[in-house]
Image (cartoon, coloured by chain):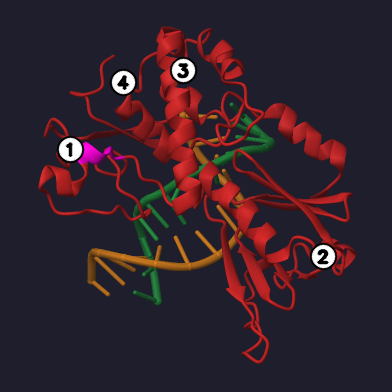
Chain colours: A red, B green, C orange
DNA sequence: TCCTTATGTACAA
DNA sequence: TGTACCTAAGGAC
């Protein structure tokens, strides 16, 4: 269940296990069988992430485009010489790569498709700047935000505006900057946007390193605040995400939740100003 | 065993 | 705005 940090981490992990090797490619579940047959035995030459999109490049020519959606999961395993071989894939595995030392299973993705380079480029072209990519231009995002009457909460989730932010980073970064999620994009100042962007760059890089989302500042950690540690189900320590009706770590007020564009929004109405 | 929920997106109306 | 899609875990019975 991924935001951009998960996908960038996957790009690294696929590279570590398979780059420069020519893995066996299969689709036990069947939906990717034709492409798997074309690719199997080809060298994995590139792995790349842009926002929540993952690209695996084979023989400098063909790309697998993967998008995990809400349910997609990836599971890596090691195979050591003399050890038990990779376990047989279950019937929900859409894509398995396997070489002499490792295997990786992909389940439940929204997208797993073989695409050409122009098709890949078209995906990059429709995505906004990604805080995890060196080529990202934050002003490209701000140009859209500063002209929009849409709420900043919705804009942060719009992958054409900024790529890689999901429901957790959206809620948490707005809390960290004390911005009410319903504030219009056009009311976000350049200074505020620069701060939000810089924060996302830091938070998401840490997310890649740790493979989880932690957003609580050192002075607000459970230890610093003298409260019991609480790690959210998603695996990290957070201020507001999925903490509806619980007390705010800073003001003690009740965290609120609401539906916004079919997603759960979380915020502290006391700490975050309209 | 059934029901709900989820870090997402695309498309129809 | 609503719905379809894809999967697995956790909680209610």
From what the image shows, is residue A148 above or below residue A30?
above
Q: Which of marks 3 and 2 is in front?
A: 3
N-terminal of the pair, mark 1 or mark 3, is 3
N-terminal of the pair, mark 4 or mark 3, is 4
Helix, strand or loop for disc 3 = helix
Give the chain letter at badge 2.
A
Image coordinates of residue A53 in percent, x first then y, are: 65, 43
Q: Which of C13 and A209 is in front in this view?
A: A209
Kindly report the distance in space between the C-alpha atoms of the residues bearing marks 3 and 2.
43 Å
Q: Which of marks 2 and 1 is in front?
A: 1
Residue indicated by mark 3: A194
Drawn side of residue A110 relative to residue A219, left or right: right
Helix, strand or loop for disc 2 = helix
Residue indicated by mark 1: A249
Helix, strand or loop for disc 1 = loop
Q: Give the range drawn in magenta.
A: A216-220
Residue indicated by mark 4: A180
| Mark identifier at residue A77 | none
Residue A266 among those drawn in magenta: no
Q: Residue at x 13, y 32 (%)?
A: A253
Q: Residues within 10 Å of mark 2 (few under 14, many from 20)?
A: many
Where residue A33 sits, quadrant-wise, is bottom right
Q: Nearer the viewer, mark 1 or mark 3?
A: 3
Helix, strand or loop for disc 4 = loop
């Amino acid at each position: 269940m991924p935001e951009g940090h998960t996908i960038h981490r996957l790009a690294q992990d696929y590279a570590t296990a398979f780059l420069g090797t020519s893995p066996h490619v299969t689709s036990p579940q069947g939906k990717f069988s034709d492409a798997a047959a074309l690719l199997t035995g080809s060298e994995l030459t590139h792995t790349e992430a842009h926002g929540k999109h993952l690209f695996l490049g084979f023989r400098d020519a063909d790309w697998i485009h993967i998008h995990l959606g809400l349910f997609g999961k990836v599971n890596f395993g090691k195979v050591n010489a003399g050890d038990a071989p990779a376990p047989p894939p279950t019937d929900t595995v859409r894509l398995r790569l396997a070489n002499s030392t490792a295997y990786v299973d992909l389940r439940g993705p929204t997208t797993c498709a073989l695409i050409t380079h122009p098709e890949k480029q078209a995906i990059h072209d429709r995505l906004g700047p990604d805080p995890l990519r060196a080529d990202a231009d934050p002003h490209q995002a701000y140009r859209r935000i500063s002209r929009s009457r849409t709420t900043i909460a919705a804009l942060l989730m719009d992958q054409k505006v900024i790529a890689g932010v999901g429901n957790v980073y959206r809620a948490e970064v707005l809390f960290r900057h004390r911005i009410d999620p319903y504030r219009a994009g056009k009311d976000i100042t350049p200074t505020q946007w620069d701060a939000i962007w810089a924060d996302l760059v830091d938070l998401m890089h840490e997310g890649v390193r740790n493979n989880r989302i932690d957003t609580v500042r050192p002075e607000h950690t459970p230890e610093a605040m003298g409260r019991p540690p609480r790690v959210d189900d998603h695996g990290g320590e957070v201020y507001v995400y999925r903490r509806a009706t619980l007390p705010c770590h800073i003001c003690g007020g009740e965290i609120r939740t609401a539906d916004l564009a079919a997603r759960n929004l979380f915020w502290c109405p006391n700490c975050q100003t309209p």
